[in-house]
Amino acid sequence: MAKDGALLFYHVFCILILTMSLLCKATSEDREVGVIFVVSIVYLGSLPQGVYSLLSHHNSILQRVVQGSYKRSFNGFAAKLTDQERGKLSNMKEVVSVFPSRTYQLQTTRSWDFMGFDEKINRNATVESDIIVGVTDSGIWPESESFTDVGFGPVPKRWKGACKGGKNFTCNNKVIGARYYLTESARDEWGHGTHTASTAAGNAVKDVSFYGLAQGTARGGVPAARIAVYKVCSHEKLCSAHNTLGAFDDAIADGVDIITISVSFTAIRDFDEDPIAIGAFHAMEKGILTSNSAGNNGPSGATVSSVAAWMLTVAASSMDRRIIDKVVLGDGRTLVGNSVNTFALNGTSFPLIHGKDVSRNCTEKSAGSCEQGCLDSDLVKGKIVLCDRYTSGVSEAYKVGALGSILTNYINIDDASFVLPLPASTLNNTEYNEVMSYMNSTRDPQANILKSEVIKDLVAPIVASLSARGPNLILPNIIKPDISAPGVEILAAYSPNASISIPHDMRRVKYNIMTGTSMACPHATAVAAYVKTFHPDWSPAAIKSSIMTTAWPMNETNSNISSGEFAYGSGHINPVKAIDPGLVYEASKEDYVKLLCMKYEESMVRLISGDNSSCPTEQLKMLALQTPLTRPNYVSYNAKVDIKVVPEIISFVSLNEEKTFDVTVAGSGLPYESRVSASLAWSDGTHSVRSPIVVYTTVELGVVYHHTSNGDSCIFNIKVPNFSSILLRGLKRTTTQETPLLRKFRIPESEIESWKPICGFRLYHDGRPRGPLWRGKKLIGKEALYAISGLKRFKDDEEKLGKFIKNHVLRLLKMDLIAVLTELERQEEVNLAIKVFNVIRKQDWYNPDVYLYKDLIISLARSKKMDDVMLLWDSMKKEDLFPDSQTYTEVIRGFLSSGSPADAMNIYEDMKNSPDPPEELPFRILLKGLLPHPLLRNRVKQDFEELFPEQHVYDPPEEIFGVRC
């Protein structure tokens, strides 16, 4: 087969993503002047067996136009070709595919602790120091403290790579290898590669912050691991496909243990034209797992571009630390925005103007958006500019010298903050419109932008709006992304040569805050490497399975789009659980070859696999049953879907023993463009091996796709997170516990009551306590709605209410409990809210947090239930918490309205001891409310004049109040 030129790629299906065109027997006459040549990738499959000269073969095909050959780990080359030449090559039997070399887009002091993965976690340090992480990105800044080799031993003997970092680049025992495929060096001039490398495997560096924000210890998930760098992206943030495939070729041959690549296409490519999928296939063949970012094209559906089953595709989610800033308007209103703003305007308000009012030579719309060249630098000097568009506004406002800027996030996504080059804040549409209304209501609008602050995010983890979503357009039966990991506002190492925001920002830092699936990907990479330190012999599929089946379950995505598993896959990554999953789903190269058979002819599959693989005559049932139907003109339905698992109990006698089982999903009446979810969980009382199942129909080009069977019922798409699960085979025992010898995993019979009907579909949930659960900011889940309804139904019957709380409220997950509390406060069901709050305080996950107290205390104060306020106030003080200014203000107002000035003064004295800076509003409320009490008022007035010497206090005539005491 090799003699015949059928060049076989490694197990990875080298998808021709590189933009290099190959030339086949082109003569000089063929290459006319003026003809456009495009760098294209010619993918020839796996490496051939036996004695064989790849370069000779490539040159015989391409003659003088080859740009480079892939010869170490798989077979292919890149060349400048015309359309005619590409067509000739594509028709050759030894060629898998020819495709243009397109470009990719590059897509943490708290994140590891948030996942329970602190510095004291159990580690296999000796093995970890032998792990080599291949970082394919924009290079690295090797002098960063995150990459020093203090305490590191010699380079692992099995390392086959080299330090070819180029100009002014030196490796050490931490950064043991470097290669670059563009520019003059592997040195990172942008910062992206340094950031991702340190997140995955950077040393622990104490007292790191970004201008005082997010201070703590910055560290990678596997700090003892070694790093090999493959620079494929330029400082212009462009990553060519042919360079990317070249990096895979080298990394596999160099001997890395895992590959992390935080780049992705904006468009979805089939496997044979996707260089990352191709490279990852051949890496898998050599026992190397590839971790890839899902992409930043969310929140729309079907945008995830990393769709191959043999890769770990990672979505981005938030952690329990958020960075916000505040805008204070001239009328005293405070609006919360999203930006990483390191500047302070010293508490002073400045003139506020709209871009359209300081324009030159632009339309009103362009000027209002602060588009390039529209703002007059003379008119914006010393002013805060309001811009209707984020992307153009911040750069233009900075360039023309505006004092600050208030921007709108026109797509109304406010779950991530980005570093800005000047005092600026990004507001959602609602708050931005408040600013516009304020400007229209006064002749002299003023505003102040405060320096960003760090707050607790009680609803984390939430899938970021920017994170790309499924379903998988290439293989609809595979859920993508696979997993979610922290990717919002991550602090990690950075290149001191790179701008920290826009190109004109001259600030330089050693550690920077970035957001994206690029930041999530190295978190998952590190967890995979951590698992490998405990299980060095595990396959990429086993490592991937352990990560996915032990993930924290998550709920529906955010308030803008409901995409469920298509946003987060199996859930949020759980590093500690991943090393002991109990069972894993195994998948081999042969399994993935069968997957390729679903899409490609047997001859092409053989080129990819490099062997005599054959495709079964009958395809897997799932795809064979898929039938296009005409789209119906109606949407009414009565879906009835059942899931059966046979057998329901699986017994294991020995370690690494394999078992199989069947999952049948049958039903009828599921409408087009609909989706319902469930999960399959095997449990032995200690482990829970959980996989999501999604039943859905899709509409493409006016055609409905679903699975059909005989009669009126349908066999719908079974969505599980990895290919081995789809095959329903290869369930392998991994737990090392040998007593008792016989280990049984079952679907817990005791939890049948947890099956919930959703559109006729039985949703299984095992009801166990879990880690943090994702919950949308505005949507309330069905479990929470049921709890709210029951609490209100039994609120007048203390006995029934107590039973309902015990049987239902106590079973709720973290975010559902918080959602119930918030909604009861909104509905002013204060007594019920207090009971739920007491439940929350007894949970294992509860950490004292002033924001849990805040809304409840404010609700009570506004209802003038001051006795209840003081009970909560005392509890809050016992937990060493200080309220914020708004809470002090409302409680003071409540006591004054209730005729208790002495209690109001007690709260005032407490406020004076608060570590937060004083604000005017509570003082003014006291000055007004204490007018009938001059002695008390004078005390407050003296403090006010001392703290705010430039502010005026109005003293009305005494006769207005009559006799005072």
Image: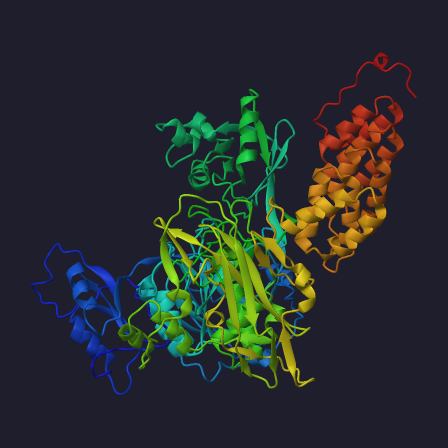
Displayed quadrant of residue 868: top right
Displayed quadrant of residue 575: bottom right
Query: Which residue is at 83% across, 51% downward?
Result: 878
The image position of residue 862, as x and y in percent, is 77, 33
Q: Could you say which is closer to the camera, residue 751 or residue 522? A: 751
Query: Which residue is at 35% across, 48% downward?
Result: 702
Query: Which residue is at 42% across, 66% downward?
Result: 622
The image position of residue 466, as x and y in percent, is 48, 50
Q: Could you say which is closer to the camera, residue 178 or residue 520? A: 520
Q: Could you say which is closer to the camera, residue 273 or residue 765? A: 765
Tally of numbered discs: 0
Q: Which residue sits furthest front?
A: 711
In the image, residue 511 sits, relative to residue 49, either above or below, namely above
Q: Could you say which is closer to the camera, residue 905 or residue 307? A: 307
Displayed quadrant of residue 627: bottom left
The answer to whether any part of residue 707 appears in the image is yes
Q: Quadrant of the C terminus?
A: top right
The answer to whether any part of residue 222 appears in the image is no
The image position of residue 509, as x and y in percent, is 52, 55
The image position of residue 263, as x and y in percent, is 41, 60
